[in-house]
Amino acid sequence: MSRYAEPMARLIEELKKLPGVGTKSAQRFAFHLLRSSDEDATALADAVRALKASLRLCSICNNVTDVDPCTYCASPVRNQRLICVVEEPTSIASIERTRGYNGVYHVLHGTLSPLHGVGPDQLRSANLLTRVEHGEVDEVILATSPTLEGEATASWLASTLRHHGVKITRIATGVPAGSDIEYADEVTMSRAMEGRREL
């Protein structure tokens, strides 16, 4: 039997479904909402409803957007022939923060993971292949994570795209800026040596 009233217990259960939110955090959030003004609680509920009602995937790149095509795909100042492939929409913000990339994106919404039943058919790659096949692309940058799944996804995409005559590149990986080489594991150090460049 729950020690909370049914509406509170239900809210806690729903909040626990959020990534990184355990029981204690969900309880804190729920009690914070209970103490909040009616206006604040209504504003939060309205924001969640609006999120679900107005956001969709861009028909070109699969980024989350409220306009179709998204602002990157519709931009006249971005290089539409340079595509950076990422796993999730959240990766775009990391690349944009560098202020050094002026191409467009393609979001796969996942990586290959046979253990979790994710094969090539579950990834959102069809519209990328269409763009490449139609000759609309000069270079595809594979910016998947340097994990086992990310590497497998990058290898699969590279082999799928290779016979279309498009340049395929992979982001460099290695020792992060500001870290100490002494603490780098062997895979990270190996990647750093492979990705070295002339100065």
Image (cartoon, helix red, strand yellow):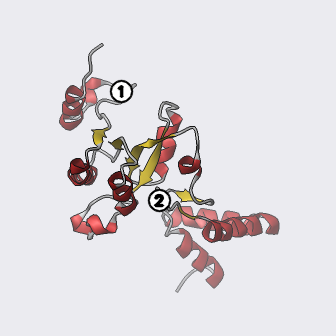
Please tell me the numbered disc located at residue 62.
2
Please tell me the numbered disc located at residue 187.
none
| Nearest the eye: 26 or 55 | 55
Q: Which residue is mark 1?
A: 179
Residue type pointed to by label 1: Ser
Q: Residue at x 52, y 60 (%)?
A: 58
* Residue 55 seen in the figure: yes
Figure check: 195 above or below 36: above
Which quadrant, please, contains the C terminus? top left
| Nearest the eye: 143 or 147 | 143
Whether label 2 touches label 1, CB < 8 Å: no
Residue type pointed to by label 2: Asn
| Residue 52 in picture, x, y percent from top left | 61, 70
| Nearest the eye: 94 or 75 | 75
* The quarter of the displayed image where residue 113 is located: bottom left
Figure check: 137 above or below 198: below
Figure check: 52 above or below 64: below
| Residue 184 in picture, x, y percent from top left | 26, 31
Closer to the chain start, of discs 2 and 1, is: 2
Q: Residue at x 22, y 33 (%)?
A: 191
| Residue 78 in picture, x, y percent from top left | 53, 39
Which element carries disc 2, helix, strand or loop? loop
